Image (cartoon, rainbow, N blue to C red):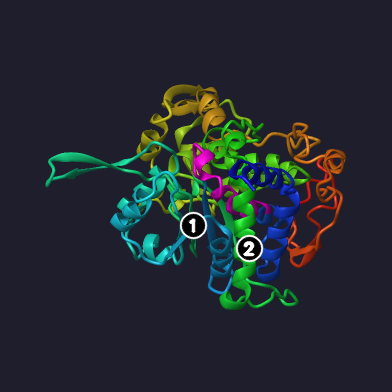
Amino acid sequence: MTAHTEHDNHDQADELVDGAELLDTVAATIARYVILPSQSAATAVVLWIAATHAVAAWNCAPRLVIRAPERRCGKSRLLDMVEGMCHRPLMTVNASPSAVYRSIGMAPSDPPTLLIDEADTIFGPKAGENEDLRGLLNAGHQRGRPALRYDAGSRSVEKIQTFAMAALAGIGAMPDTIEDRAAVIRMRRRAAGEEVAPYRVRRDGPELDELRQRLNQWLTSHIDQLRAATPDMPLEDRAADTWEPMIAVADLAGGQWPRAARKAAVALTSDRDAGDETSIPSRLLADCRTAFQDADALPTQILLDRLRSDPEAPWATMGAAGLTAMRMGNLLREFEIRSDTIRFPTGQAKGYHRSDFTDAWNRYCPEPKPAPGEAVPAVPASTPQVSPKEASATGTAQAVPTTQAVPHLTSGNEAGTAGTPYPLRAVSADSTSGAA
């Protein structure tokens, strides 16, 4: 058999891979060993693992953050699943920035996937900020952001590549600049009745390695298609950059994955926006909107009194006397909002006009929009990778039909109910349920 014939047969075999079925298998495998907090989390993890095999196609390398409030929530076991199936895993629990730089720089065209366990010991409150490592992880999110180091021996500036996929697992939140570039998975301890199989590397590792090889074969054969992909995104700005590789993989797979991917992107991004602490200036803006109620203007003292009366807000404990008029004025001036002398029914006083806040409210803390009838944007029509009719005509093995069901995953649903089985492929891509 000639090399040309072998190449043609290899390409033909790749075209017969049912991407949706392969992703379903990856999801079912993870669910055997780990209880994930939601369907969206399961979708994100599967797509992130798959995206590591096509890193050459991406402009941005999304981070995967696996965090938990306490020990024994399954975060390290989930990282084991990622290590077993991602592309060129490089696991560490304590790495110096220079070691990470060199690990990426040794193969910049095919970088390893960085896996950092116990990341709270690196970025936690007692560990310091580790600005060098955080800067590396932030820069490596986008292609073409090398670190510059001066080599005194050669008297030249050295460019060190930073672009690589990275996953971090730990207790508590990671630095905000890292989570802003990540799909964040919030693990939780298993409830009574939630059972998983024990994972042993020697016994179970080969199955994960086989899936790694299948993912790599499928995705590397579509690198050019993925590099040119411009999927319709339900997000904007950095969130869209982060999720684009995962949604591109979902669109390539077809089946229910395009809709599930967009649902996961919206759900996990919304969870992060709602759950994380807002900066003090933005929090002040949002709380001022609540304090104004329907008033067109408020005296400064009344606005302060309303802010400090909220027992769950930081304003009553900010300083010895709480938030002061001067501190509030300084914070609001950053948004070009200034106090003025206003005539009120009780007389003239320093205060704020509601209209001066409108532009800042719209830009920095917009009110949630009414829920649309469809929670996930419409998914563009896609052509299956393999048509059963075409496969039959060529006499080759037919792809698995897209309506075939796979073993259910046991996980929490979006409403937070743990241990509810849900199918990955029981619906078509046109279904409005968006089940992952």
Nearer the observer: mark 2 or 1; the answer is 2
Residue at point 47%, 41% (across, down): 304
Q: Earlier in the sequence, mark 2 or mark 1?
A: 1
Per the image, label 2 sits on a secondary structure element best described as: helix
Where does label 2 land, which residue? Answer: 210
Compare residues 285 and 92 and report the one nearer the observer: 92
Which numbered disc covers residue 43?
none
The kind of residue on which mark 1 rests is Arg
Residue at 35% x, 44% y: name it.
Answer: 161
Magenta segment's dominant SS is: helix
Answer yes or no: is residue 281 visible.
yes
Expressed as whole percent of the image width and height from the top left, the position of residue 130 reads 32, 56
Amino acid at dot 2: Glu
Mark linked to residue 88: 1
Identify the residue shown where x is 72% and y is 41%: 258
Picture quadrant where residue 430 is located: top right
Residue that sits furthest to the front in the current view: 1
Q: Which residues are magenta?
A: 43-61
Q: Is residue 159 left or right of residue 410?
A: left
Residue 22, horizontal then vertical, whole percent: 71, 54
